[in-house]
Each structure stands twice: as structure tokens, then as C-alpha cells.
Amino acid sequence: MSFGALCIVVLCQVLQVQSQSFSRRLYDPKSKTEGKFIKLRNDLPVFSTVATGKITLREVALGYNDEMIQLVTNQYNVYHSGIQIEVDDNGTPVTFILELWDNIGGNTSLVPTNYSANGAPLWETKHIEIVNTPGLDEKHWGAWFQSTNGALLAETVTGTQLNGLMEFVVAWINNPFHRLYIPFTVWPTTSPSMDVKRQGYDLTCDSFTEDFFWQMAELKITLNQNVPRFMRNYSPIISKSFDPKNPVLVDSTDPEIKEYYRKAGILGTSKAVYGALKTWEGPVFLPAQVGDPAAYPSKYYKIAQQEGGVTPSILFTVVEYSEMPLPTQFLNTCNKIASAFQCWFSWACKVPGRGGGNCIDGFCQCADCVFTDDSCMNGADPATVAAAINDGSGNNSMGLGMVASVAKSRMLQGSVVALLLLFGSAEW
């Protein structure tokens, strides 16, 4: 066993002992006592035309009831997400947080409650709720080592736009296709395109926050450009034969569906089902958001062959934390300024921590969005980068002098981080 793996095993054992002997219950989120389920428009604020608001994406590690669990889930990027809204409405502050809950949880959320006479699964309980909690809750959403501290999405949102977003939330939660919590999605590869990710078949807290961000773009809200790389959790079933553009649909009465849920019910949790995928015998099924909404789910996606899921961590956190699809409106307005890292060859820009891009005029530079960690959204060929950076006259239009000064600061920061990682990893 490697030294690193041994250290992690020892850490797990220490955490388990501490969790059993010394764990303290963390601060309960306000949403547990003050949160209200959204059903109607009057469950949310109505804003005047002079109101202005700020919207932030928040993330907090799962397991708020046990400090040890939460510290570990933060290490392995297993998060719950929500939308924080802060408004000044003609001098009156209005602040609240919206988040999606699986209000059932466990085996009851994983498998149907019953079956009809013709064998169709019956989901007799609504799983999903959108919770509105007044005020900020930094003890929960901003806890040190238990939160990403979020990303500012927009800070000049008008009252009209805010009302449009509130109407969207009400329509979203009352959509019959949003009744069931679905932890899994399907990818044909472990590195799918963003359109495949956006088409996802899962329905989780991250599905809601992603949809909310896309709706902000639809309402032409001015989106913040100075943002970190947007990430979210996925639990993808990997099936090379699955065609997202032409998925296989079967009726809810297909007898294989009942057999799938029988086996899933024995395993008892979505985590256990996901971990068993590599040795799973028979097809896997997911409720499909197609057909008559009132009869949902009348159809199911059939994944006849699958190669398992993403490799679970040593602590069996089986979700993947990877880049979230971004709306076209953001991509059209995001920062496209060069990265600040000095280079001599383009391969140097691919070194972890350099963020990608290509080496142009001595710096790693992006042709597409560049985030606050200096990483490029995606790579581009040097000719495209050069065209984006130069104004056509041979003069650089993005201010490489500024980039050079930033580069010195970034290089110093990088050296400090490298030393911390070096000595920190030995202790870990």
C-alpha cells in the first residue's frame, strides 16, 4: 500500500473514532426551522420596480449534523447548493436563500412505493421541494473548510428581473416533471460535451441551481464576468452505447423495470446502487421527462449496457465534481483576457495549475473564457488565440504589460502554494 493511501486509511480511522467519541452536532441550518416550501407565488417576495438585487451561488459540504463527516465531504467535493438573493427594495433589505430538498430521502426516494395492476411503478409521494429561508445563514453556508463560499452571479438585478426569477421558481417546482428526485444521469463517456451534461437526466439540488442560472441569462440579467470555474456534482452512469440524441424509451409497464427496482431496493441507497454498477446484471432505468406530464413517469430511459460509473473515492463518495454547462449569454460576455502565466512553449500551459490555453508572446493565453484562477474554459489553437489577442495591426489589444505585472504576482503565489502542498502532503 502506498504511503498516501496508508495515511488516508489512518485518517479515516481517526475520523471515525473522533466522530463516535467527540463529534459535536453542528449548527442546524435555518432552513430546518425557518424554511418554507414554495408552492404559490405569494410564498416568495414581490419586488418594486426600483428594487436592485445581488444573486450568489452557494455550496456547502454535505453532512451538517456531524463535523467530521462534513470536513471529509468537503475534501472530496460533495456539496449541497443553493441560491442566495440579497435585495434593496427602496431602502428595505430583503434577503433569502432558495434550495432544493429531497424531502423523502433513503429507500423511499430510490424505489416506487407500489406497482399498478399492469406492473407500472407508482410514485405516490412527491420527493422534491424548493425551500425559501429568510436571511443569511453563514454558519451553515460559509463555514470554514465546509464551504466553497460561493460565486457572485449578478449584482445589478432589477426588480422586474427579480420578479421574473420568482415566477420561474414557482413554475419550476410546480412542473409535474420535477416531482421525483433522480440522483443519476447517463453519459456515453467519462468526459462528455457540455450539451450532454446540460441534457442531464438527473434531478438534484444542482439541477435547480443550474436551471436558475440559465434562467438569469434568459431574462438578460447582466452576469458577473469575474467568476471562478463553475462546478457541480454528478453521479453519471457510463454507457458507451447510450445515444443522448436518440435514447431508448420504454413504457412504464416494461417488466424489466420492476426487476431493476427490486434489486435497487435490496441495496437500499443510491450510493450502494451506484457502487454496484460495474457488476450489475441487466438494464438500468431512469424516469423520463417525456409524454403526458400528469402521467409522469409514463416512460423510462433504458440503459441496456453500461460500464459502471466514475471511480469512487477511498471514502466511497461516488459523485463527480466537474464543470457545469454555462449559458450562451455568459460565454458571449465572459472575460477573455490572457492568463498571467509566463511560458516559452504551449505545452507548459498544460501543466496542472496553469489552466490551459496556448503560449502567445511569452504568456499562457485563452481564446475563450478565463476564470479567476487563471484557467481557460477550454483550449483553442494558437491561431485562434492570436486572432483574439491581436487587433489586426500586430499590436496587442489586451495589454500584455498588465498581464506581465499580474504574472509576477501569480508566480509568487504559485511558489507559496507549491511549498504548502509539498509539506502539507507529507503530513497528510
Image: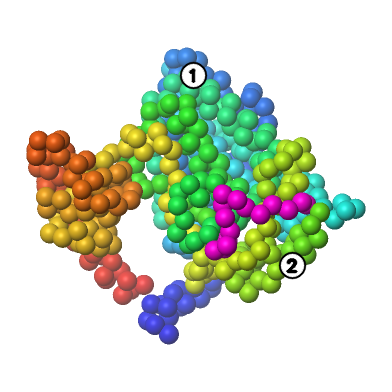
- Please tell me in which quadrant of the rendered image residue 282 appears: bottom right
Q: Farthest residue in the front direction? A: 246
Magenta portion: prevailing SS class: loop
Q: Is residue 371 above or below residue 190?
A: above
Q: Amino acid at mark 2?
A: Lys
Residue visible at 14% across and 57% down?
343
Please give the name of the residue rendered at 57% of the width and 24% of the height, measured from the top-left corner: 45
Q: Quadrant of the N terminus?
A: bottom left
Give residue 349's mark: none
Dot 1 corresponds to which residue? 160
Q: Position of residue 115 (x, y in %)?
A: 84, 54
**Mark 1 belongs to which amino acid?**
Thr
Callout 2 crowding tier (Cα within 10 Å): few <14, some 14–19, many ≥20: some
Q: Residue furthest right?
A: 117
The residue pinned by badge 2 equals: 263
Q: Alpha carbon of mark 2 to alpha carbon of mark 1: how far?
A: 49 Å
* Residue 74 percent location from the top left of the image: 46, 58
Give coordinates of residue 137: x percent, y percent.
49, 40
Q: Is residue 85 magenta?
A: no
Residue, x 68% and y 33% (percent of image)? 174
Highlighted range, magenta = 236-252
Left or right: 38 in relation to 318:
right
Image point (26%, 70%), residue name: 422
Secondary structure state at the residue bearing disc 1: helix
Query: Disc 2 vs disc 1: which is toward the camera?
Result: 2
Q: In the rendered view, does 251 fall on the left or right side of 28?
A: right
Sequence order check: which comes first, mark 2 or mark 1? 1
Q: Would residue 142 be seen by someone viewing this image from the given angle?
A: no
- Residue 245 located within the stretch drawn in magenta: yes
